Image (cartoon, rainbow, N blue to C red):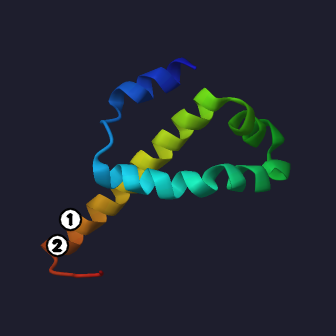
Amino acid sequence: MEWIQQVKKNIIPLSEEKEDLKKAFESTFEDTAAGEFDKNKDFFGKILKDDDFKKSLLDLLIYDIYSTLKNQERKNKREGIRWY
């Protein structure tokens, strides 16, 4: 699990906006993992049984989703596109 510790060091603290995204995502994350369990029992079983792994994975996903959305927002502003 050394890689998890390394990734945690690289993730910036959550802003309020990112925290809101995390709350919305967390509400369905475990249900989705349980629903996908039969497709990959080892991986999804680890998510459901190992809280540290689940939290680390969730943090990585939130970071990736948030970064992608913010980058798209910046690109849209540069190009004069409003999508909201």
Question: Quick one: 80 or 19, which is closer to the camera?
Answer: 19
- Circle 2 Cα neighbour tier, 10 Å, few/some/many (<14 / 14–19 / ≥20): few
Is 61 on the left or on the right of 33, as rendered?
left
Farthest-out residue, top: 2
Instruction: Give the number of the disc on residue 77.
Output: 2
Confirm whether residue 36 shows in the render: no
Q: Tell me the CA gap for discs 1 and 2.
A: 5 Å
Q: Secondary structure at mark 1?
A: helix
Q: Residue at x 14, y 71 (%)?
A: 78
Q: Residue at x 73, y 33 (%)?
A: 46
- Tell me the kind of residue under disc 1: Arg
Q: Residue at x 34, y 30 (%)?
A: 10
Residue, disc 1: 74
- Tell me the kind of residue under disc 2: Lys
83 versus 48 height, above or below: below
Q: Quadrant of the N terminus?
A: top right
Where is residue 57 drawn, in percent x and y?
55, 39
Do the numbered discs 1 and 2 sit on residues whose CB atoms are within 8 Å? yes
Is 50 on the left or on the right of 74, as rendered?
right
Q: Residue at x 51, y 26 (%)?
A: 4
84 versus 6 height, above or below: below
